Amino acid sequence: MKSKIIPIVFVCFLLAFTIVAAKSIGDVEPIDWKTKRLIKADGVYNTATKEKIKDVAKAEIWIDKYVEEEKSYHVDSVIKEDTTVDIELFYEIQPDEITYESHNGKYKQIYTYNDWDWKEKGNNQTGGYVIISDVILEYGLGSNTFTDAISGATWQNDGVDVTLTENTDYTLSGSTFTLANINYAWTGITGIWDYQIKKIFHNITYDSQIELEGNTSIAGMMLTISLIGIVLGTLIGIFVISRRKKI
């Protein structure tokens, strides 16, 4: 009786192992790369649905590493033919530009912030993600490189000031300040205002040199009053002196 049980258990074990092995083999089947895919640090996603298709450990294209000395991401591909993908790269500070060079130098492209989408990391965390569309990768390990460059001021406290241009870098509506240039991020701003005095008189708006009706400026009016005062003072002085002489 025992001799019959052992073979049955062994057969069940083999069957279970075969099912698990078949599932594992199915997981590493190639992706249809004719459909647009998004390459992230943790795997391959469907660009349209944002659904994860394959983990990075089993992907044919993956982000290998970031080399600090080179300021470069290395992206690997084991697909023999050139493949068009979207790529998401993380940066603590959004770069001014990213230079892409493919494995054998067949493709080279310089991207600026106008060429990609920037997604903040959120949850009060610094940094964000650059998403570059329609990158053509060549076959190669660690040889498709994305080299970033930053020039000028950043949103870190580096002691560099940038003068912002209205309607290009920012907009101001009432008391609402909106940063329009997506290449800038800020937690504080130094503002300099040139105040001009304005008053309303008889439903007329007057600027820093207040004008009265008849185009007489306040400066002219004050000058007139001063001259009248001088004349009156002189007359009164003459009158007082003449009375003293008579006395």
Image (cartoon, grey):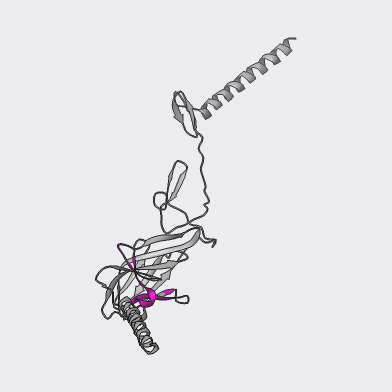
Quarter the C terminus occupies: top right
Q: Position of residue 37 (x, y in %)?
A: 30, 68
Q: Which residues are magenta?
A: 43-72
Instruction: Kindly indicate the quadrant of the structure image that contains residue 129.
Output: bottom left
Q: Position of residue 80 (x, y in %)?
A: 27, 81
Instruction: Kindly indicate the quadrant of the structure image that contains residue 55.
Output: bottom left
Note whether residue 145 is visible.
no
* Depth order, front residue of 235/130: 130
Q: Is residue 124 above or below residue 62?
A: above
Q: Is residue 50 magenta?
A: yes
Instruction: Kindly indicate the quadrant of the structure image that contains residue 38.
Output: bottom left
Please name the residue shown 48% across and 58% down the image: 123
**Residue farthest toward the right in the current orientation of the protein:** 247
**Residue farthest toward the bottom in the current orientation of the protein:** 3
Q: Position of residue 153 (x, y in %)?
A: 48, 61
* Depth order, front residue of 182/131: 131
Is 75 placed left or right of 155 in the picture?
left
**Residue farthest toward the top in the current orientation of the protein:** 247
* Depth order, front residue of 26/181: 26
Q: Position of residue 29 (x, y in %)?
A: 29, 77
* Depth order, front residue of 206/114: 114
Q: Is residue 184 magenta?
A: no
